[in-house]
Image: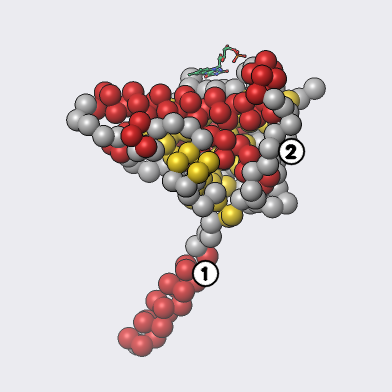
Amino acid sequence: MRTFALSLLATVLMAQETQAPKPIKLPAHKGGSLTLDKALEERQSTRNLTGPALSLDTLSQLLWSAQGENRPGKRTVPSANARYPLELYVVATKSDALADGVYKYSPKDHSMLKVKDGNPETIFGSIKGMQPWIPKCPAVFIFSGVSSRMGGNDPQRKEAYTFWESGAAVQALLLQVTANGLGATVVSGVDLDAVKSAAGLLDDEKISVIVPVGRIAK
Ligand SMILES: Cc1cc2nc3c(=O)[nH]c(=O)nc-3n(C[C@H](O)[C@H](O)[C@H](O)COP(=O)(O)O)c2cc1C
């Protein structure tokens, strides 16, 4: 009986191991087609957003712009004392290359790891008082931060620096969204604690904003 129980346990553990999601290596980011001036001229909030799902190439461009490494160990966006308190997620709709899911970006190896099942419709559509256009978007980026990673003893300063960095990362994302001919809007007027719970973020993370992204509907 004991041998049977042990072999059953081993089978269950092996099955869990084979099912654990593997990081998805993203394609190298490519140069955009707009000049910086043009992207700054054209950036504006757009809420009338639609599919199709973002391709891996587009996700690569957007994630890299917001938090990617542009030289070893350092990122596109500045960080006080290079502490890097931000975590970046994208809730994506399935495409040929990707399953529905909540994905966490890893700047170090430019990959993303699925941390939870779901898509914008199921994750955001389930939250009370959600702005109705958000669950219809093909991808929603979540900017969260772990302010305890910042140096010093002043909690307010740590929060402020983390929030500041989030703003810089969001603008980098928005300019790349524009350069890719897509639309987006920064959103904080929703229940961000409910978003944190629905998307399965870790306890020590605090969401600053979410950014729905998609094609601009005609
Ligand atoms: C921190 C922040 C929070 C925002 N929250 C929302 C929001 O909850 N819903 C929304 O539709 N737009 C939101 N916006 C977008 C603003 O309404 C928008 O940026 C503003 O009207 C200026 O328009 P523009 O972005 O087209 O220049 C937010 C913008 C910022 C910076």
Here the colouring is secondary structure
Find out if the beta carbon at label 1 lies less than 8 Å from the nearest ligand 1 atom: no
Return the disc, 1 or 2, that comes first in the chain's sequence. 1
> In which quadrant will I find the N terminus?
bottom left
Tally of marks? 2
Q: Picture coordinates of residue 62 (x, y %)?
A: 61, 37
Q: Nearer the viewer, residue 194 or 85?
A: 85
Q: What amino acid is found at the position of numbered circle 1 in the picture?
A: Thr
Ligand 1 quadrant in view: top right
Residue 79 in which image quadrant: top left
Looking at the image, residue 75 lies above or below residue 158: below
| Image marks 1 and 2: residues in contact by CB distance under 8 Å | no
Residue at figure coordinates x 59%, y 54% from the top left: 25
**Alpha carbons under labels 1 and 2: distance apart:** 30 Å
* Residue projecting furthest to the right: 218
Q: Nearer the viewer, residue 154 or 30?
A: 30
Find out if the beta carbon at label 2 lies less than 8 Å from the nearest ligand 1 atom: no
Q: Can residue 190 be seen here?
A: no
Q: Picture coordinates of residue 104 (x, y %)?
A: 50, 46
User: As drawn, is 80 to the left or to the right of 104?
Assistant: left
Q: Which residue is label 2 attached to?
A: 52
Q: What amino acid is found at the position of numbered circle 2 in the picture?
A: Pro
Q: Which residue is label 1 attached to?
A: 18
Q: Nearer the viewer, residue 44 or 137?
A: 44
Residue at figure coordinates x 48%, y 26% from the top left: 168
User: As drawn, is 210 to the left or to the right of 147?
Assistant: right
Residue at figure coordinates x 21%, y 26% from the top left: 154
Q: Residue 93: give its label.
A: none
- Determine the secondary structure under disc 2: loop
